[in-house]
Amino acid sequence: MQTAQTTQTTATEPNPRRRPNIVLILADDMGYSDLGCYGSEIRTPHLDALAAGGMRLTQMYNAARCCPTRASLLTGLYPHQAGVGHMANNFGVAGYRGFLNDRCVTIAEALRAGGYRTYMSGKWHVGGSAGWLWDDPRAGTPDHPRPIDRGFDHHFGTLAGMGSFYDPHTLIQDDTFLGHQDPGFYYTDAIGDYAVRAIGECAAQGDPFFLYVAFTAPHYPLHALEEDIARYRGHYRKGWSALRAERYERQQSAGLLPHRWPLSPDDPLAPRWHERSAADRDWEDARMAVYAAQIDRLDQNVGKILAALCARGLGENALVLFLSDNGATAEYLAPDIGPQIPTRTQDGRPIRKGNVRRIMPGPADTLMSYDLPWANASNTPFRLYKHYLHEGGISTPLIAYWPGVISSGGIAHQPCHLIDVMATCLDAAGVAYPTEFNGREIVPMEGESLLPLFRGDPRWRRQREICWEHEGNRAIRQANWKLVSRYPNDWELYDLGADRTELVDLAAKHKPKAAQLSGLYESWAARCDVMPWDEMLRRGARGSRPHTSPYEAPTP
């Protein structure tokens, strides 16, 4: 395996008697254009080399939000089928339990039954509402399963959805909560270090293994090490509009985007850079520099993982997949944001909460996000963000690497969805998807194996439509047609072959197509336990305000 250089490989059929080790790596809240190999200026040499030695997919989709994506990724089902149609709260109905239900089977459970060792390092967030207590006693109960309860032999990481990078709450190893961490702890490094340790243990055991590495970077808070921040400080004084234009040009030059897809306009809520004061520009530059530093450190740890595979002679028969759980987030953190854990640093300083301009991001005593304009740049060339089902919310990079199977330097433009990851992993391992598990009937898998695509079959296409629902936002994609609605608005229709940046709504022009897709969506929603969002609100669900900020007029 190459981490700094790449060599050409030719795809061949894998040896069925030599099952691959599988490493699945997930970033958190990272936008479509945030890797160097997808147009970014951020330093990501290890992921860039992985892409050069394997394949990049340009039309891979996630489920627009942390919990739903993780539920789909791990089960090969749509999130509602797995019980995580919203977030971690339990609303007492099948699609909205907030934890992985007993009608699904995880990749870890299926592969372990097929003879694989299974390890996880990092963020769980599909185990119900256990989230803000350091050692929540509900963890491990039927409504709050941990990774070791859903097929993983061992796990190190957090149960909660977010937290400090320097002292994360709900940090657990297998079934033991670890409590406050010593000075010098940084979560991204700890996730990478445990993954390296897991590879060593698996190599010694000799069995094939599945390793799921779920980083929390670059999810807020903006916490990064000064040595990484220093590489980027001052780089972003050009502003978000210039950054979007530069990334778009690199994407086109790399063959990721056809020229017929224009760059979407800047979000109308984003202020003009030249109208910001000098002090504001310095602060905005610092926020984006910290965000870039978080991705830089993530890439460094991917490099450690790849090096560990190589050092143990495992790199030549490893299927490595890398993607992000949703598009970049435009979430604004107000100074009066609700309780966050921890409230103080290890040395007793209070956490300074919110996107306050006099506070510089990065250290342990801050809790800050990077806001709508920079998220707009991260999602280049698309519009909208995490939570929404327009392309900016659901498009992810996907890098796939498997020497001898995936040819070097490939780019695939076929639409795929992360429900396909389960099918792909089982196909690669030669393990069948069960019809029953632990005496329970299991929902049939929704995903389709990507191995024919990875092997270079130009005729491969998904056979079924792809559908989404999150907090009333709805979408369906069939071939190049996409029907999408931003709650509570009407349907919009786009021809993504001509207009993937979703600038020309064709709903009025192609009413029969819109009606057909709407009918298919409704059939899918009924089959997959999707409830109308108005009904969920009546049940007590709370919709997120994903980009309420100083850039947006208050909603009446």
Image (cartoon, grey):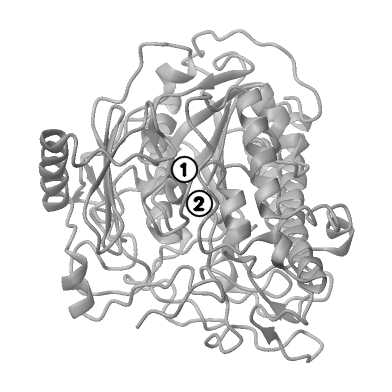
Give the residue at x 64% y 65%: 370
Q: Which residue is mark 1?
A: 395
- Nearest to N terminus: mark 2 or mark 1: 2
Tell which of 427 and 473 is nearer to you: 473
Give the residue at x 42% y 38%: 111
Position of 232 relative to 94 (above/below):
above
Alpha-carbon distance for marks 2 and 1? 6 Å
Say what secondary structure mark 2 lies in. loop
Left or right of residue 433, residue 219 in this image: right
The quarter of the picture where residue 257 lies is: top right
**Could you tell me which quadrant the N terminus lies in?**
top right
Tell which of 24 and 50 is nearer to you: 50
The quarter of the picture where residue 516 lies is: top left
Left or right of residue 195, residue 300 in this image: right
Q: Amino acid at mark 1?
A: Ser
The spot of residue 141 in percent (x, y) is 36, 73
Marks 1 and 2: in contact by CB < 8 Å?
yes
Say what secondary structure mark 1 lies in. strand
Q: Which residue is mark 2?
A: 327
**Could you tell me which quadrant the C terminus lies in?**
bottom left
Q: Residues within 10 Å of mark 1 (few under 14, many from 20)?
A: many
In the rendering, which numbered label is found on residue 460? none
The spot of residue 161 in percent (x, y) is 51, 68
Position of 366 relative to 259 (above/below):
below
The spot of residue 116 in percent (x, y) is 49, 37
The quarter of the picture where residue 245 lies is: top right
